[in-house]
Amino acid sequence: MPSAIVTASYRGDFERCRLLCDSIDARVAGITRHVILVEAADMALFRPLAGPRREIVCERDLLPFWLKPFPDPLSLGRRRIWLSPKGLPLRGWHVQQLRRIAMAATMPEAVMISCDSDIVFVKPFDAASLQQGGAVAFHRVADAFSALREPALGEHRAWSAKAGALLGIPHGQASDTGYIATLIAWRTDTARQMVARIESVGQRPYMASLAATRCLSECTIYGRFVDEVEGRPDRHAPSQRNLCRIYWSGEAMTEAEIEGFAATMEPDQVAVGIQSFTGTGTGLIRRAAGLA
């Protein structure tokens, strides 16, 4: 089944996104294209990244007209907020999730591989490895929250409960199963059925239901739909495999530390993600990844 990589990004991550693109071009096979989803104001900045296998898609082609970005007065305009008549203001990370859901529900490829913009592939990766006899890899970790402490535990359970409510799962109770990863595959036919379910439960367009909340985890919504609503285990191959090793927080890493971090990857991991808010320089990451 045809697969495409989809990345939601923004101008603050541009250099990291460029590095992701270079690593995809050098090391990824088995995809039809790489799609980058950005705000209209960022289109000119990202357009040079387009190429024969890469498209830059404006969020205006995906999101409803009533959801619009504005400078955030609380950050003196350095950040953006998205306003709508449906609910409270949304942050960029909320809207990136909405873009990915909308893309999955409309793209022609059978599989969307969602990939954050601060990831870099450091090993060869064939997207076909995410398919097994017609089933697509489904990231699922039982009891994923058992090791978490507050406030992370409460946040994950709130996301799970909201996913249950959006999908009409009885009582909207939280599940302790984890579905979140930074490099993850979705079936697009399942995504279309998922948004149809949200519309049926909410009795309004799915984007209106999603934009009405800031308690949002698109991976959790998809995961609970697959597990508790869809009822098609033949379409999914559950796996705890995490393709990407993530450096979530801490001090900025040196080049040697990045190389050591990559050297301790699990055998089936193909990428590393060093969160931008750690302050680790993109040039260091590029050199450590062998892409300088």
Image: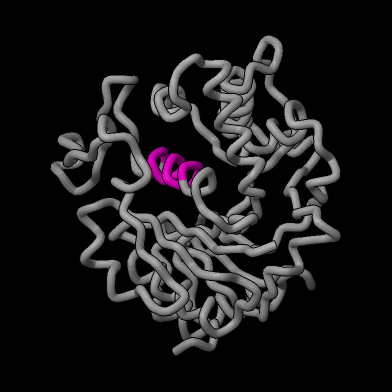
Q: Is residue 18 visible?
A: yes
Relative to 202, residue 45 above or below: below
Which one is in front, 274 or 103? 103
Instruction: Using residue 40 as the reference point, say whether residue 106 is left or right of it.
Output: right
Instruction: Using residue 121 as the reference point, say whether residue 93 is left or right of it.
Output: left
Instruction: Using residue 228 as the reference point, say whether residue 88 is left or right of it.
Output: left
Q: Position of residue 14 (x, y in %)?
A: 33, 66
Relative to 210, residue 47 above or below: below
Instruction: Using residue 8 as the reference point, say whether residue 222 is left or right of it.
Output: right
Which colouring convention does the figure follow?
one colour
* Screen quadrant of the C terminus: bottom left
- Identify the residue at image location x=39%, y=67%: 55
* Screen quadrant of the N terminus: bottom right
Which quadrant of the structure image shows residue 35? Answer: bottom left
- Identify the residue at image location x=38%, y=78%: 51
The residue stretch that appears in magenta: 94-102
Prevalent SS, magenta region: helix
Q: Position of residue 194 (x, y in %)?
A: 61, 33
